[in-house]
Amino acid sequence: MLLDHRVNVVICLERNNLKKILEALDMGEISTGRGLNQETNLKRAGDTRWSSHYNTLLSLINMFGAVIDVLELIGRDASSTSHRPEAHDIIDRLLSFDFLLSLFLMKKVSAITNELYQELQRKDQDIVNAMTLVQVSKIQIQSLRESGWSSLLDGVTSFCEKHGVDIPQMDAKYVARGRRRRNEEERTNLNHYKIETFYTVLDMQLGELNARFSDSAMELLMCVSCLDPSNSFSHYNKEKLLRLVDFYSEDFTEFDKCKLSDQLDDYIVDMRQSKDFFGLNGISDLARIMVDTRRNKVYPLVYLLLTLA
């Protein structure tokens, strides 16, 4: 995701030689006196691909107090000398407003895009649903950018108060961790957190979605989806299939396009009434059965569209 190195602490706990934490939490073997023995586990990033990051962040927020307790135990454990400095450093980072703001922002962005990424990973992917979710994600992120700052700040502030984390005054000067760079421009906490973090992250996320799913790319995918044979060719749309030809202008002449228009009328009736084409799940299935039944010879221009898509 699109956040700075502070958030990597969440995803990379194992890489920081603290496997003991995650293994104990996953197995439910650690009790800290704060109700840690519960069904919720601290999910490991990578377990379930895209959704794993969202689950990891959500679990960390829900189990934050327990995680801090475990790290404190490691920090006090005489038998874990090599881990103690590392545990104290992670506690210091976790118990900071900078980290918690990034954590909650990353969780919010992951929640918005989670359904989209899961749909894109499905083997029986529904292109129409996927493109709808792209639009939903773009709208949600834009809405968050325009009117979500106050709500995010309130949530982070409340969480900080619950866990005893210092909350900076937004109109005070921002002081970065570590040594200050020469000629570094002074700015307020509000400028840093809202403009340099909140706006920057959301703009990067919108930019990524727009780059991967441009208007022309989405139109192409929507046209391709009209070839989908699932649910008795429910996505079929003749006009969009003829528009699809325009994306492959080098493969179709104007004469071909006229022939395709007539060919599609017979094709869709044939597909919907033939038992050979019942229960197909994707374009690859359709292409295979067309070859098996020699429909690729009957509808050569439709089959050419299939092979190009």
Image (cartoon, rainbow, N blue to C red):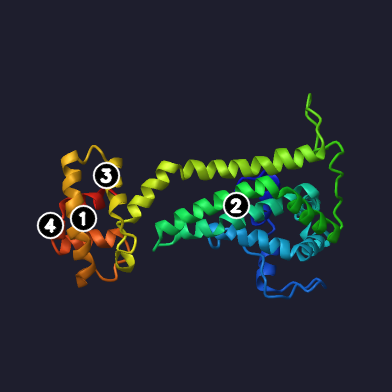
Which image quadrant for residue 28? bottom right
Amino acid marked by disc 1: Leu
- Assign a secondary structure to mark 2: helix
Give yes or no for contact between labels 2 and 3 (Cβ–Cβ under 8 Å): no
Visible in this render: residue 84? no
Q: Residue 217: in sight, yes or no?
A: yes
Residue at image mark 4: 298
Percent across and percent down for residue 30 are 74, 72
Instruction: Identify the mark at residue 264; answer none if there is no mark.
Output: 1
Circle 3 is placed at which residue position?
Answer: 245
Distance of label 2 from label 3 (alpha carbons): 33 Å
Residue shown at the point (16%, 56%) measured from the top left: 296
Disc 2 residue type? Answer: Gln
Looking at the image, residue 43 sits to the left or right of residue 63; the answer is left
User: Residue sitting at 81 percent across and 54 percent down?
Assistant: 157
Q: Amino acid at mark 3?
A: Val
Q: Pointer 2: what residue? A: 140
Q: CA distance from mark 3 to mark 4?
A: 19 Å
In the picture, measured across the screen, residue 131 lies left or right of residue 204, that is left
235 relative position to 129: left or right: left
Q: Cα distance, mark 2 to mark 1?
A: 38 Å
- When the figure is inspected, residue 304 is found, relative to residue 247, above or below; the finding is below
Could you tell me how far apart the alpha carbons at marks 2 and 4 are, in whole angstroms? 46 Å
Rendered location of residue 199, percent (x, y): 67, 41
Looking at the image, which is closer to me, 286 or 123? 286
Q: Mark 2, residues whose alpha carbon is within 10 Å: few (<14), some, or many (≥20)?
A: some
Q: Position of residue 84 (x, y in %)?
A: 79, 55
Name which residue type carries label 4.
Val
The x, y position of residue 169, in whole percent, is 87, 44
